[in-house]
Image (cartoon, coloured by chain):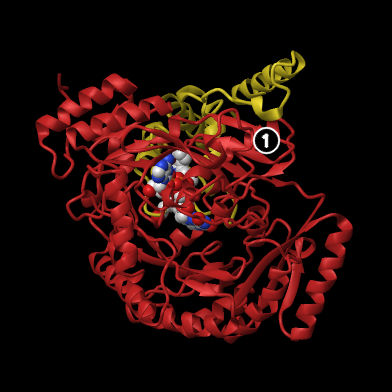
Amino acid sequence: MTTAREVAHIPDGVTKEAFLAALARFEAIVGAHNVLTGEERLTPYYKTMMPADDTDYATSAVLQPTSTEQVQAIVKVCNEFGVPVWPTSTGRNFGYGTYAQGTAKGHRHQVVIDFRHMNRILEVDAELGTALLEPGVTYQQLVDYLEANDIPLWVSCPAPSAIASPVGNTLDRGVGYTPYGEHFMMQCGMEVVLANGDVLRTAMGGVEGSNSWQVFKWGFGPYLDGIFTQSNFGIVTKMGLWLMPKPPAYKPFYIRFPDDEDITAIVDMMRPLRMANIIPNAVVFAHALWEAPAVIPRSKYYDGKGAMPKDAIERMKTEEGFGAWNVYAALYGTPEQVEVNWKIVTDAVKRLGKGEIFTEAELGGKEPFNYRAALMRGGMNLQEFGLYRWRGGGGSMWFAPVTVAKGSETLTQTKLATEILNKWGFDYCGEYIVGMRDMHHVIDLLFDKTDEEDTKNAHACMSELIEEFRKRGYAVYRTNNAFMDQVADCYGPVQRRINQTLKRALDPNGIIAPGKSGIGA
Amino acid sequence: MSLLDKSLRIAAVAALALMASGLAATARDTVTERLDDRRMFGSGREAFTKTCARCHTGLDSAVGPNLFQKEYDPEVLKYFARHGFGPMPAFTESMIDNATLDELAAYVARQGKGESR
Ligand SMILES: Cc1cc2nc3c(=O)[nH]c(=O)nc-3n(C[C@H](O)[C@H](O)[C@H](O)COP(=O)(O)OP(=O)(O)OC[C@H]3O[C@@H](n4cnc5c(N)ncnc54)[C@H](O)[C@@H]3O)c2cc1C
């Protein structure tokens, strides 16, 4: 049996006949309407922000399963016909590839599994603050559910909140801005369809009749959940996560620092407060060139070629009231706890002798404070997409090296990144997101994808950033499809080999997302 | 109450009924039905509010231009939604299905013409 469909792309290494035969089998599994081919239905899946030809990352077809059993049947067909599939939850991985699949090297045109239609909220335990979700559930859907049922729990979301998914974000080890901001740390229990069609429930999920799948992460024996994140070892069809009890009091605040060098003192002042959970959330130190894009276009202060000159940045800071560094943090708890902690925070700032502190009283309703305050309580918001308007042209890559939470580190990293970015004509649009003891130094490499030269430079710049940082012992925590091999190399040959060994054992035919994170077929 | 809210309420009521009958007295039975194509959003207007309007806020600080200040042909709006545009992401059918997008586009087009609904 085959199908009469027209297909624009065929997965590398698969014949047209085999592909059409596989599509017919997919149609029988998910229904013809849930097998997407053809320009019109696939167009929204093609747009990436990477400095690459989108055709190299274009999917050959999209499947929209609605059950775990359908996914099991899909992998059987994939094995039979050698067809690779790239699972996505909601596919909003902007700046990390969006719906792109493969790494353009022999693994092009994989079939995308779009889980958006598999979108049941399977459980919310209001007492324990746990949820069990299918991958297609968006943050918006979860928030709507909690609100409709008066459940006083908060989600922790990344900046694309409303349109992204807890499962997809957590599987790429993304971050949010609440005290639960390190999302994978708050994940508990998974259901995974393996390449051989087995359905694995991790940890307590393996115990028949257990009711602790969403409360105890480790189970017995090797802890497996981690190997299914940023990987291609399985397809996740359910995920448990923890939700934060809504605190009686919430106090977001902003501290403005005038000088670039202040970052050192900021980090050292905030670290003890964060480690002692006085400030419990994923705090952000945003540079002026991250603060500005959220609210104004670059052209307001500079319309020329190359990186924005220092004097234009200074003029913008003065006129718009941006700090060189802009700190966003929040306090959570009972009103009494918040009051005590507020004194500790304001005393610390006073002792530093630098930094002006603002709260909702002065900045409520004003951007960017407004959107930061929303994100720090898991509120739906898309204001940060202003970054993409900064230069225009729709090109973006996150360069996000891991940093230790020490002031001494930040000057080196910020200076190095700025030098390399400026050399290629790009701005340092960066911020530090504070973890427990680390920081994600997140830089948005923004470029004009409609301009060939800019696009070429962006590619070269990203490559140089990765390499120069590697030479100094730094590496990124996540990357887009075009740079997965280079980043995997930073982590050394032994890690590459063990990943490949696991891949061969779990997916001998290499049908799940070959190339992902530098792990081939 | 939107359709979405309604289906969630029904699920919650069903869960309560289960608890009352002592079948499974935990909050774990709050299973929602699958929001299939049509009910991912209760209406085109709700889809607009929960996606487009988060960037096209109509405020000075908005990420995207005010869509209520121009007269758009609904087809143009649909084209932008499916293709994206520079900073604006493209929206798949699985995010906003065709029927909802038709409603959404008609809703935005009416606003541009200064009609109240
Ligand atoms: C302005 C802006 C700000 C951003 N801010 C943040 C931020 O604060 N924090 C942050 O983390 N990110 C941020 N991002 C990046 C990104 O948009 C989010 O991380 C987003 O949540 C990822 O998209 P998604 O949730 O749809 O996941 P998906 O795209 O669905 O998934 C991501 C990847 O995980 C894997 N995957 C997904 N589902 C499965 C599955 N079921 N089985 C196996 N593997 C799977 C796939 O490889 C997929 O490519 C930002 C982007 C923009 C544009």
Q: Give residue A445's quadrant in the image.
A: bottom left
**Count of marks, rendered view:** 1
Q: In the image, residue A474 lies at what x, y percent?
A: 42, 76
> Which residue occupies the foreground of this view, A85 or B4?
A85
Q: Colour of chain B?
A: yellow
Asked if A263 appears above or below A140 in the picture, the reply is: below
Colour-to-chain, red: A
Residue A502 visible from this viewpoint: yes
Q: In the image, residue A516 lies at what x, y percent?
A: 31, 53
User: Which residue appears farthest toward the front when viewing the image?
Assistant: A221
Q: In which quadrant will I find the C terminus of chain B?
A: top right
Q: Amino acid at mark 1?
A: Leu
A128 relative to A102 in the view: left or right: right
User: Would you name the residue on which mark 1 appears?
Assistant: A146
Q: In the image, residue A228 lies at what x, y percent?
A: 42, 48
A234 relative to A380 in the view: left or right: left
User: Which residue appears farthest toward the top when viewing the image?
Assistant: B21
Residue A305 visible from this viewpoint: no
A338 relative to A208 in the view: left or right: right
Q: Give residue A205's quadrant in the image.
A: top right
Q: In which quadrant will I find the N terminus of chain B?
A: top right
> Which residue occupies the foreground of this view, A84 or A453?
A84
